[in-house]
């Protein structure tokens, strides 16, 4: 699954760019339930100029992300 980034507001002008950018993920109900049930999470960046991955996400980060799911 890929994130959706910065679609809600314009974050830059010709003079500046925002120092904070946001990403969101559209999770299905099954994905939310799996996360709440303890499924491991992975994340990464797949850009032509930068690739990085974290698999699995450490428990402290995973728990904070799952807590945000309500």
Image (tube, helix red, strand yellow):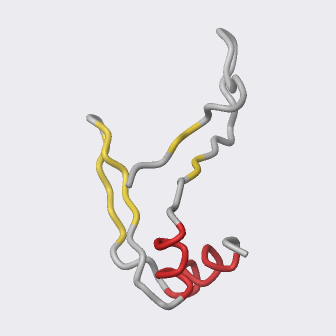
How many marks can you see?
0
Q: Position of residue 17 (x, y in %)?
A: 66, 25
Q: Position of residue 16 (x, y in %)?
A: 69, 19
Q: Position of residue 15 (x, y in %)?
A: 69, 12
Q: Position of residue 23 (x, y in %)?
A: 58, 47
Q: Nearer the viewer, residue 54 or 4?
A: 4
Quarter of the figure with residue 5: top right
Q: Nearer the viewer, residue 26 or 62?
A: 26
Quarter of the figure with residue 67: bottom right
Which residue is painted at 54% across and 54% down in the image? 26
Q: Quadrant of the N terminus?
A: bottom left
Q: Residue extending furthest front?
A: 29
Q: Is residue 25 above or below residue 8?
A: below
Q: From the viewer's perspective, is 52 left or right of 12?
A: left
Q: Residue extending furthest top?
A: 14
Q: From the viewer's perspective, is 11 left or right of 57?
A: right
Q: Quadrant of the C terminus?
A: bottom right
Which residue is painted at 58% across and 50% down in the image? 24
Q: Nearer the viewer, residue 13 or 69?
A: 69
Q: Is residue 7 above or below residue 46?
A: above
Q: From the viewer's perspective, is 47 left or right of 17?
A: left
Which residue is painted at 36% across and 79% down in the image? 56
Q: Is residue 22 above or below residue 55?
A: above
């Amino acid at each position: 699954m890929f994130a959706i980034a910065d679609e809600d507001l314009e974050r830059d002008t010709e003079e500046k760019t925002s120092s904070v950018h946001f990403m969101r993920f559209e999770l299905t109900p099954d994905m939310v339930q799996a996360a709440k049930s303890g499924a491991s999470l992975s994340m990464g960046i797949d850009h032509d100029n930068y690739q990085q991955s974290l698999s699995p996400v450490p428990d402290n980060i995973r728990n904070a992300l799952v807590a945000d799911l309500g």
